[in-house]
Amino acid sequence: MARTLVGLDIGSSGLRAAEFSVGNRRLRLRRFAQLELPAGVVRAGTVVDPDALTAALVELWSIGRFRSKTVALGVANAGVLVRQMDLDWMAPSDFSKALRYQVEDALPMAVDDANLDYHLLDDVEVPGEDGAPRRVARVLLVAAAREMVDAFVGAVDRAGLRAVSVDLVPFALVRSAVMSAPSVTPDDAPLEALVDIGFDVVTLVVHQSGQPRYVRMLPGVGSDAISQAIRERYDWTWEEAERTKVVVGLAGHSTLKPEVPRADGLDHPAQRVVGAEAEALASEIATTLDYVRDADRPDIARVLLAGAGSRLAGLPELFEERLGVPVERMALTDRVRRPLRGRDDESDDISVMIAAGLCLRAKSTRGVGRPSRQGSMSRKRTSASEAAPLAEAKRKHGAQVLPSVNLLSPWAFERIAVRQLRTRFAISCLMVVSAAVAAWGLQSMRIADAEDLLTVENAETSRLTERTNVLQPVRTFIAGVEQQKVTVSEAMASEIYFSNVLDSMSEAVPAGAVLDSLVVTLAPPPPAPVPAPAEEGSEEDSPTPAPAVPAVASPCPGPDPFQTLPVVGCITLSGSAGSRAEVGAFVVALGADESFVEPFISTTTTADAAKVTFSGSVGLSEKVFSARYAALEQMLVGKG
């Protein structure tokens, strides 16, 4: 998610603030506002009247309706030192701690009164005092008077805003100029000069593919110097001189066309003063560029103009003629998206340029540096220990490392750290409370679901209980039927089909034989079986039906009195036959029938030659039981 940051450009003539959404690929301009400052509030990049500046900032935020109060500041004045230095290479933590001691002699102020930071240029080897190679970190040292920085930060704080960085305006210009340029090897890239013409400060930076090679700030010169020259020449008010400067511009570029051409070729007499001051400024810039050219560097390919002073009509053409290189006005690149309104207004690009570069700090070096133990050094993400691989990467792959510093005072860093700690603590507490609320809500939902389920189960139990009570008579009736089934089964277990017995007996009697008598004796029934107890939880509470009456030891005499087969009854019989052979056939027939067991003829008598009388017995097997009620339940179910 993109975060929002406001780039704040504080100049002597006014305030310019632009709110951007800082994304991964580009900036998106959300809001822009500017406000003129009364004369004397800020002079030459230094705060003169902090209270008036605070009031102006409050008014600016009201006009612009900015949503964010997080501010990135820029400074450029005589109180800032920018110098290239070769410092002994050290590990990152040691380098940060030792920086103040290594540069102490190079500062025009006491080191304890300065806010220090640096931009790493390269990791190189230089000849040492003994001729041996000496590894050094080549850096651009940036030192600012702490009192000057605190004046800006204090005014911002009193306006209810939060300053998270104080960067160098020349570095912001570089970031704005190269944020859409192709990645090329810095050593092969042409030099480019960026000139910001402010109200009373001119900032010049020469860079090579984003790497600053020379930085200079010229206080006391700028667009106001032209207005003051016009005011003094014609004894006008400052407002009249400023308005005339804007209207007439340089010769040949005035919006006023005289009815009668002047002999000197000018459109207005004031153009002579404007031209002289512009020539002086061009001469100063040309001298600086000549110094850069003499420093064994490639020639300068072009010059880009920025700042309110660059709006002077004809100024790019004059600079191009005097400097001998192409001169253009800087414009916002495609990396900065802006609303449709004002897209073609070049003055908007000039006003937003520095603010956009200040916000691009978040893209080149994420986050705010933290102070060292000494409190005057902010640690950089790009450290001295990373110099060698960084330089090699730049040479091989053309990687761009855009310049960026943070000149906040130690107390500001400590306040930011405390604010971050409080924010993290608040977020942690919020997360804990949210988790507790979520857990409580989830548990409440589970309890509610359980209560709903219990209510449903209780209702179902009540319904089933009522239905059970309704069906209780049916259950009693079924129990009675079951008891009757048991009674019937026990009563009819010993029923014998005597008709079948007599039929089987008749079939076994030979044709010449006759039975005179039959006496049936049934075996005594065994003790009644004890019903098995119902299993616990069984729905049936009726006794188990008694089994059929089992056979008992035979009461009939058999062929072997010591080994008799079990029978359910005994038939004692007597009769006559034509011969003993018929009697034997009768015995054999009885033995072949399953209904009889151990047929035995105990006596045979021959009264005359034509007739043999006999007597004996035969046992009845279990086959003689009718078993009509053995499956009484199945019978009842089948009928139902």
Image (cartoon, rainbow, N blue to C red):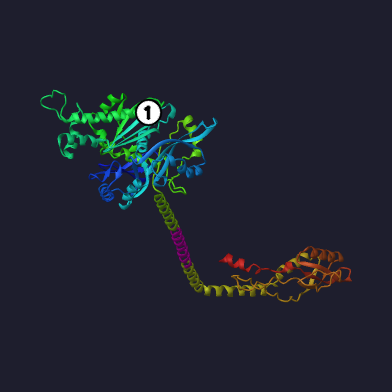
Residue depicted at 24% across the width and 35% down the height: 223
Residue under numbered circle 1: 292
Front residue of 322/427: it is 322
Q: Quadrant of residue 106?
A: top left
Q: Which residues are magenta?
A: 432-454
Q: Secondary structure at mark 1?
A: helix
Q: Main secondary structure of the magenta part?
A: helix
Q: Is residue 482 above or below residue 140?
A: below
Percent position (x, y) of residue 432?
45, 58
Percent position (x, y) of residue 195?
31, 33
Front residue of 54/608: it is 54
Number of labelled discs?
1
| Image quarter hosting the N terminus | top left
Percent position (x, y) of residue 178?
37, 33
Q: Is residue 119 left or right of residue 639?
A: left
Percent position (x, y) of residue 551?
76, 71
Q: Quadrant of residue 514?
A: bottom right
Q: Is residue 135 visible?
A: yes
Front residue of 616/249: it is 249
Residue depicted at 43% across the width and 40% down the height: 105
User: What amino acid type is highlighted by mark number 1?
Assistant: Val
Q: Is residue 528 left or right of residue 458?
A: right
Q: Is residue 331 above or below residue 411?
A: above
Residue depicted at 44% across the width and 28% down the height: 187
Disc 1 packing (10 Å; few <14; some 14–19; many ≥20)? some
Q: Is residue 356 above or below residue 437?
A: above
| Image quarter hosting the C terminus | bottom right
